[in-house]
Image (spheres, helix red, strand yellow):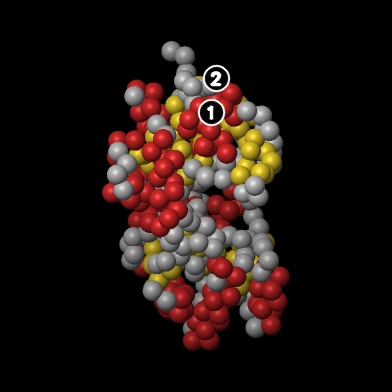
Amino acid sequence: MQKKKVLIIQSVIPHYRVPIFNALAKHVDLTVVYDKGDVPSDAEFETKKIEVFTVLKKLTVHKKSIVRLSRKFDVTIMMLNRSYLSTHLLCGLRGKTKVIFWGIGVAAGYNTRFDSIPKTAEKLKHIIDRADAALFYSSYPVEKYSKMGVHAEKLFVANNTVRVLPITECERNTILFVGSLYRAKKIFELLECYQKAYSECEDLPQMVIIGDGDDAEPARKWVAEKGLENQILLPGAIYDEKLLSEYFSRAIVCISPDQAGLSVLKSFGYGVPFVTHKDAITGGERLNIENGVSGILLDSFDEITNVIKECAQTPERYISMGENAKKHYDENRTVDHMANGFLDAIKFVLNK
């Protein structure tokens, strides 16, 4: 039986999406349109680069007609983004193609708390109403839009996740932070909590901070000034998954004070519990954390000091949480789970 033709339109093709798209391409004839960057070398699907330009300072327009291109496909999946003019055009001029919008589903971003702007959901609802289906990173928007009057049958979930490698069997003896380094993530609060814990309990696990960014050099300077170079390591950004897997396999816990994105799923996949603030910046990934079971949701950043000391005094508590986190990933958040979320939405719109 001939595979259905599916078009996905987004700005870039991030390396962490490739395993999901590859899994999806086993079931459909997949093409991904992008406008920035390059195609990762491990992509096993068709790609097409179409440049964009901006009008009225906020609307993004593709230089070639996305509407005309989409009519060659059975299903078109676009990011749920009001700034793309193609989003609005496809709603009214879709032709035979079925339209699915995909995204976080609520206001969220590095400077915006999850679902903190009610008007955003109201505006997105108008787009979702006109689509054949909507696909979200978590179940939260499904419940939200159902209550707002959108038919629940057209709302689907492809839980956000990332690929992981097998865990390397070794002693878990480090505390990990993974991500870009900038003030909004409260990286200096993390450093200060470690310093305080070290002043009270010198037998602490090393902390490894993986990532680069505006605050990478100031963080290195801070560590040197405090004389903690042997306790706090900053190897920089690491993109090689095999090397990352080795760091995660040695971690007792992963701490990110005020940001909980895909690093939550990466940690879970490697059997590492995740510690973050209960209101941390997120795209919904924070909702995977069950407090005290697969991680810790902090009421206050000051609590990080005690978490760090507990990693030295009762590491078995966090190792047990890591086992729960790994079970959650394996049973609910693998690459195939996410790809199946796409397939469910695709099958629905094709059978409408």
Q: Nearer the viewer, residue 100 or 334?
A: 100
Single out the mark in the foreground, 2 or 1: 2
Q: Residue at x 29, y 44 (%)?
A: 149
Q: Residue at x 49, y 86 (%)?
A: 200
Q: Residue at x 46, y 38 (%)?
A: 101
Q: Quadrant of the N terminus?
A: top left
Q: Earlier in the sequence, mark 2 or mark 1?
A: 1
- In the current view of this chain or complex, which residue is farthest to the top? 1
- Residue 15 picture location, percent across and down: 60, 43
Tags 2 and 1 touching, CB below 8 Å: yes
Q: Residue at x 51, y 41 (%)?
A: 79
Q: Nearer the viewer, residue 233 or 121?
A: 121
- How would you rate the neighbour count of disc 1 (Cα within 10 Å): few for under 14, some for 14-19, many for 20 or more? many
Check the image and report above or below for 11 versus 229: above
Name the amino acid type tagged 1.
Leu
> In the drawing, what numbered circle is on residue 72?
2
Name the amino acid type tagged 2.
Lys
Q: Nearer the viewer, residue 270 or 181?
A: 181
Measured Cα–Cα span from mark 2 to mark 1 = 9 Å
Determine which residue is flagged by label 1.
Answer: 7
Residue 341, visible in the rendered structure: no
- Residue 115 picture location, percent across and down: 42, 58
Label 1: element kind? strand
Q: How many marks?
A: 2
Residue 81, visible in the rendered structure: yes
Q: Going by the image, does 129 lie left or right of 37?
A: left
Check the image and report above or below for 172 versus 62: below
Q: Going by the image, does 222 lie left or right of 131?
A: right
Q: Quadrant of the C terminus?
A: top left
- How would you rate the neighbour count of disc 2 (Cα within 10 Å): few for under 14, some for 14-19, many for 20 or more? some
- Residue 65 picture location, percent across and down: 62, 28
- In the current view of this chain or complex, which residue is farthest to the bottom? 200
